[in-house]
């Protein structure tokens, strides 16, 4: 039986940092409100000439190096993003060219903040089926491009970044299970109401900005993530005590705390980067994973639960033995 294992991780944050104090000058908000309601202190924002593919490339090169591979050994590239450089080619194809890889499948996955979990689930299935041996899986976003910087309800929450993993075929597991879900009936709670084919809203607005009913999303996120913890543990015949680490989507400290409580995990076994990164959508889970692997917190043999929730609505989890 072939499994997929994490062979290497990488992350990248743009240089420019936007603090809560700076946001106080842009919209009617306070550092205290943002910290108390979300846990966020600062976020990184891409430079004007920096694109999602630029961020993805840095993270990808770091992950490939950590896996001790040459780029030419990568045989599958999946980029999870909601903010691709162009309509097409896909960001995965743009990245493939930059890495001088030719011929392997390369495509984007769009599941908003759950995108990386979706991409990981797809790559895991490619590897288990024998269709790939070294998959490069990336979450990369320049969310700052679709944030309305005059809307205090959303602009304080998001940041830019990229995280990457190399998944490798292995005789020992690796990824134990992935669980992917969506329910389009809640789509309007978190959306960019215009795009490529729908060029304007009923009111005639055409610029693609994010809109969110934060309070509703908050409640659904807490309930849904609680359910997916149960589903993931049951599928693996495990209890909360079998999980060493929670690496959650970094949207809000209070949502993360609720999931940690469900898992009965102490705070020091929950990887939190939301204070420093904000919500980087598809990049948030692989960025947090990379931080905790590189600083030595997550060690080989430990069991790690990844989970995410986002627009769509979409949600998902991956349980893995590192
Ligand atoms: N600064 C100051 N006040 C703000 C503010 C800001 N940046 N944003 C909203 N407020 C105000 C609201 O206008 C409201 O004022 P009112 O009571 O006078 O109407 C008040 O704060 C409370 O708003 P509410 O939306 O109920 O706050 P909240 O405690 O739910 O926190 C979020 C708001 C967005 C932080 C929270 O709902 C959240 O994190 N939701 C989930 C978002 C998410 O995870 N989205 C991505 C999913 S991937």
Image (cartoon, helix red, strand yellow):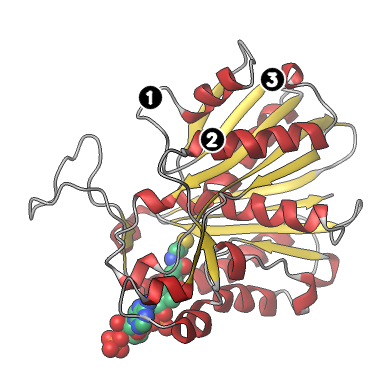
Q: Nearer the viewer, mark 1 or mark 2?
A: 2
Task: Give the foreground label among 1 and 3.
Answer: 1
Would residue 87 be visible to someone looking at this image? yes
- In which of the image's four quarters is ligand 1 placed? bottom left
Residue nearest the viewer, comparing 33 with 227: 33
Label 3: which residue? 75
Residue 3 x/y as whole percent? 81, 35
Percent position of residue 312, x then y: 39, 53
The dot on residue 54 is 2
Q: Is residue 130 above or below residue 271?
A: above
Residue 33 position within the rendered picture, expressed as x and y whole percent measured from the top left: 44, 85
Considering depth in this image, is 41 or 231 the residue closer to the camera?
Answer: 41
In front here: 302 or 11? 11
Q: Secondary structure at mark 2?
A: helix
Disc 3 to disc 2, C-alpha distance: 20 Å
Mark toward the start of the polypeptide (1 vs 3)? 3
> In terms of depth relative to the viewer, which is nearer, 212 or 239?
212
Image mark count: 3
- The reply to whether dot 3 and dot 2 touch (C-beta < 8 Å) is no
Q: On the rendered structure, is 30 left or right of 181?
A: left
**Residue at point 26%, 48% (across, down):** 208
Under circle 3, the secondary element is loop
| Left or right side of 228 for 263 | right
* Circle 1 crowding by C-alpha within 10 Å: few under 14, some 14–19, many from 20: few
**Mark 3: few, some, or many residues within 10 Å (few <14, many ≥20)?**
some
Q: CA distance from mark 1 to mark 2?
A: 16 Å
Residue found at x 28% / y 68%: 151
Circle 3 or circle 2, nearest the eye: 2
Q: Quadrant of residue 166?
A: top right
Residue 2 appears anywhere in the view:
no
Residue at the disc numbered 1:
88
């Amino acid at each position: 039986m072939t499994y997929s294992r994490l062979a290497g991780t990488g992350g990248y944050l743009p240089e420019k940092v936007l603090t809560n104090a700076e946001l106080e000058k842009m919209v009617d908000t306070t550092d205290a409100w943002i910290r108390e309601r979300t846990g966020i202190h600062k976020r990184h924002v891409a430079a004007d000439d920096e694109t999602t593919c630029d961020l993805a490339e840095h993270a990808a090169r770091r992950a490939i190096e950590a896996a001790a591979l040459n780029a030419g050994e990568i045989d599958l590239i999946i980029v999870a993003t909601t903010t691709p450089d162009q309509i097409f080619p896909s960001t995965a194809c743009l990245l493939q060219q930059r890495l001088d890889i030719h011929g392997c499948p390369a495509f984007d996955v769009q599941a908003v903040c759950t995108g990386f979990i979706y991409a990981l689930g797809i790559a895991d299935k490619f590897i288990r089926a024998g269709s790939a041996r070294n998959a490069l899986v990336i979450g990369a976003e320049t969310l700052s491009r679709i944030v309305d910087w005059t809307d205090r309800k959303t602009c304080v929450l998001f940041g830019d970044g990229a995280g990457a993993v190399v998944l490798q075929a292995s005789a020992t597991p690796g990824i134990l299970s992935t669980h992917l879900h969506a329910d389009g009936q809640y789509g309007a709670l978190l959306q960019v109401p215009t795009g490529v084919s729908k060029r304007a809203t009923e009111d005639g607005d055409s610029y693609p900005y994010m809109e969110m009913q934060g309070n509703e999303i908050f409640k659904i996120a807490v309930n849904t993530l609680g359910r997916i913890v149960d589903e993931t543990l049951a599928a693996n015949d495990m209890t909360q005590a079998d999980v060493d680490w929670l690496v959650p989507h970094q949207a809000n400290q209070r949502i993360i705390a609720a999931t940690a409580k469900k898992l009965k995990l102490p705070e020091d076994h929950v990887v939190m980067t939301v204070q420093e990164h904000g919500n980087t959508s598809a990049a948030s889970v692989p960025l947090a994973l990379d931080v905790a692997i590189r600083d030595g917190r997550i060690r080989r043999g430990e069991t790690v639960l990844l989970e995410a929730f986002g627009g769509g609505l979409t949600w998902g989890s991956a349980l893995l033995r590192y």
